[in-house]
């Protein structure tokens, strides 16, 4: 009953269903990323000519091959832990001297939140890491760590934005950023201790489709810089560029509009260099999770399709009620997909929240060992996986042929 939810536009994985079926292991789920889709996202981002630098927020997907690819496309890396910084340094150094010469002095941008003093010290020791301080506490309490250093400051934009409350990072209730009310004190403290504030940063949240968000950040940060930090020349407008969950590889985001808004801003304020740091947009549509049907069960009028993948592999549906398209590719486009059933797609984890999709329409013929493809999981999929219930973390491959 019902129609299969095929995306409105063709997705990369539709062209290689036999290959995807053949790489799916019999008893473990697998993440597959398509190189072509990452290249496509990066080229869409390259429309943002008003930016002088783009960073990739590596928390979205820190697979080594994905990082190598993204870095080779000229993006810097935005990190949130020393572990990420260390991996980012390895990635950038493996690119070789030519790439290093191409980049800027600080291809790694480190934006930690509520970390210990030692973590700041570790990052400040690396000359190619620019540290973004998002609280008055480190500056007040650990002043000697920052004295004489060049840093950026993360400002709370005052209101959050994004696809779910959990991913909004602005406003009084958010733990991120320095309040604009503290900036006068902050500027005095930095001046007194020769802390060189080279730029300001803001990030409102994740999954934002309205280009005006980043222009708001530009205006806000510029006014704070002009008032309090006249030597700051970099404005990092944050990440958060959204992807249409129903049709990930679509032109949902209007880069031309964002670029013209940012270009107009730069004409008004030529003293500033603009940066951004998207994560999701770069990798989300490139990734699919391949899983096998374990059991099909009907109980009290509800049909459950069980997979060998669950919330330990992909926590976004459980955590944010996020939508991911779910397709039975063993039956894709066959006669068998005309008769459909409405079902709840679940995993093997011992939690009632282990649901990957509710009210989904799958072929009525769906049966044990069929290959199920879960869409748009290249961002915050494998990177948020756990070994809950002592289930192993899924393997990943970056496929160059797709
Ligand atoms: N910059 C900062 C300071 C961030 O905190 C984040 C994401 C980004 C950039 C990249 O945001 P993106 O472009 O990927 O939206 N796990 C959630 C998303 C959490 C985002 C955390 N910060 C999800 O699966 O939706």
Image: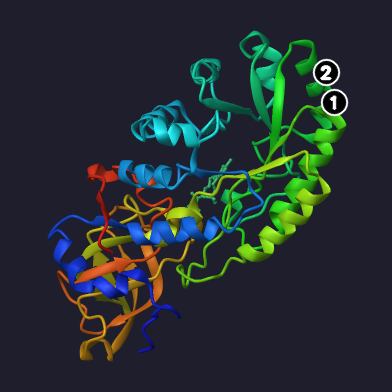
Q: Position of residue 385 (x, y in %)?
A: 35, 46
Q: Quadrant of the N terminus?
A: bottom left
* Most distant residue in the top direction: 144
State the residue position of label 2: 188
Q: Secondary structure at mark 2?
A: helix
The one nearer the camera, 34 or 312, is: 34
- Determine contact: label 2, label 1, CB under 8 Å: yes
- 24 in relation to 304, above or below: above
- 180 in relation to 28, above or below: above
- 131 in relation to 56, above or below: above
Judge the density around disc 2: few (<14), some (14-19), many (≥20) Cα neighbours within 10 Å.
Answer: some
Tell me, yes or no, if residue 293 can be seen here: no
State the residue position of label 1: 184
Q: Secondary structure at mark 1?
A: helix
The residue at 55%/33% (across/down) is 104
Disc number placed over residue 169 in the picture, else none: none
């Amino acid at each position: 009953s019902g129609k299969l939810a095929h995306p409105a536009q063709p997705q990369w994985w539709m062209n290689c269903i036999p290959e995807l079926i053949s790489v799916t292991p019999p008893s473990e789920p697998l993440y597959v990323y398509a190189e072509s889709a990452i290249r496509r996202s990066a080229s869409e981002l390259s429309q943002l000519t008003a930016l002088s630098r783009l960073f990739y927020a590596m928390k979205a997907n820190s697979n080594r091959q994905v990082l190598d690819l993204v870095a080779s496309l000229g993006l810097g890396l935005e990190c949130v832990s020393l572990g990420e910084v260390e991996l980012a340094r390895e990635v950038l150094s493996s690119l070789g001297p030519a790439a290093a010469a191409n980049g800027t002095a600080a291809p790694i941008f480190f934006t930690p939140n509520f970390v210990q003093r030692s973590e700041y010290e570790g990052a400040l020791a690396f000359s190619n890491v620019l540290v973004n301080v998002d609280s008055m506490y480190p500056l007040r309490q650990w002043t000697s760590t920052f004295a004489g250093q060049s840093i950026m400051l993360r400002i709370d934009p005052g209101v959050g934005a994004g696809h779910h409350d959990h991913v909004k990072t602005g406003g009084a209730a958010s733990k991120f950023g320095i309040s604009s009310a503290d900036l006068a004190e902050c500027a005095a403290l930095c001046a007194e201790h020769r802390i060189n504030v080279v730029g300001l940063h803001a990030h409102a949240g994740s999954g934002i489709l309205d280009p005006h968000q980043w222009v708001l950040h530009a205006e806000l940060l510029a006014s704070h810089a002009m008032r309090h930090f006249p030597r700051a020349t970099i404005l990092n407008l944050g990440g958060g560029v959204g992807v249409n969950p129903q049709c990930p590889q679509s032109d949902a985001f209007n880069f031309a509009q964002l670029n013209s808004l940012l270009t107009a801003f730069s004409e008004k304020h030529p003293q500033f260099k603009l940066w951004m740091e998207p994560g999701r947009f770069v990798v989300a549509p490139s990734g699919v999770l391949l899983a096998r049907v374990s059991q099909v069960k009907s109980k009290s009028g509800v049909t459950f399709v069980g997979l060998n993948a669950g919330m330990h592999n992909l926590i976004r549906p459980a955590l944010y009620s996020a939508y991911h398209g779910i397709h039975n590719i063993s039956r894709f486009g066959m006669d068998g997909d005309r008769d459909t059933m409405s079902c709840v797609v679940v995993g093997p984890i011992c939690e009632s929240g282990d649901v990957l999709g509710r009210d989904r329409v799958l072929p009525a013929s769906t049966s044990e060992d069929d290959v199920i493809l879960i869409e748009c999981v290249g961002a915050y999929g494998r990177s948020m996986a756990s070994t809950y219930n002592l289930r192993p973390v899924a393997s990943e491959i970056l496929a160059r042929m797709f």
